[in-house]
Amino acid sequence: MPVKQGLIILLIFAGALSCKKDSKPTPGDNYPQSVTFTYGGKTETFGVVKRTYSKDAAGQPLPAPVVKLWLDRNLGASRVAISPYDTLASGDLFQWGRQADGHQYRYSKTTDTASATIVPGHDKFIVKSPDSDWLITHNDSLWNGISNTNCPCPNGWRVPAAGELGMEMHSWDSLTLNAAWASPLKWSVGGDRDGVGHVLYATYWSFIWSSTTETDGDVSCLAIIGGYTAEVTGSSRIFGLSVRCIRDY
């Protein structure tokens, strides 16, 4: 499991705070209802979900509501989840900061040779790196900043920051997978791919990348631990996790 173990135990009995309900799109709402883009060599059309938050990433009241737009499913998902355990909604598993170069497919081939560049030039999932990164040297500028380098999201979209995942998490009725699926974003199981290339927890847990790097070299992610808890914690960059794209309203 990619997340920090101690934090999960501490949060098992933590409650979640609710946020303002999302209004249905009206003629005055100026945002796209769907996005069409090329992914994996195919044309995909995903829906867009408007979310209005009244609690921050720590669950505290915001001085004013914050509105974000999200894609309605993870990258690589076949459909919006019809249940918390819908594996057709799981999508692909990206190593943090990599392009959608084919490595993200759940059972892509592996290589134990770390990359010296941010574009490895192949579609293999990189494993067994001593520094827990698919790169020889950490690069914190990937998937964030002005350039948004290597971002796999559609043009104009990005990987969410840790704080945005935190706001979403604190909008649920409880810190559980069922409550996450009850969100308009319909979060569901996805699992992860570990540092040796094994897909784990695919039918009962979910892990979603953020763009936020941590001081210890890990990257923040949203971990939904089935019926037990959910939290924003850290994961090694070499792991494969889900990606859900976001943009400002």
Image (spheres, rainbow, N blue to C red):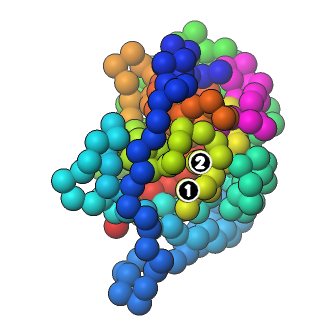
> Residue 13: where, in percent of width, then height?
52, 26
Q: Is residue 139 left or right of residue 207?
A: left
Q: Residue at x 51, y 77 (%)?
A: 33
Q: Residue at x 55, y 25 (%)?
A: 12
The picture quadrant where one finds residue 165 is: top left
Query: Is residue 196 magenta-colored?
Result: yes
The residue that disc 2 covers is: 179
Query: Is residue 194 magenta-colored?
Result: yes
Alpha carbon of mark 1 to alpha carbon of mark 2: how far?
7 Å
The 10 Å Cα crowd at callout 1, few under 14, some 14 to 19, many 20 or more, is: some
Q: Are marks 1 and 2 in contact (CB under 8 Å)?
A: yes
The picture quadrant where one finds residue 186 is: bottom right
Q: Residue at x 63, y 52 (%)?
A: 181
Say what secondary structure mark 2 lies in. helix
Circle 2: residue type: Ala
The residue that disc 1 covers is: 183
Q: Is residue 200 above or below residue 6?
A: below
> Residue 1: where, in percent of width, then height?
65, 21
Magenta range is 193-206
- Residue extending farthest bottom: 27
Q: Residue at x 39, y 55 (%)?
A: 19
Say what secondary structure mark 1 lies in. loop
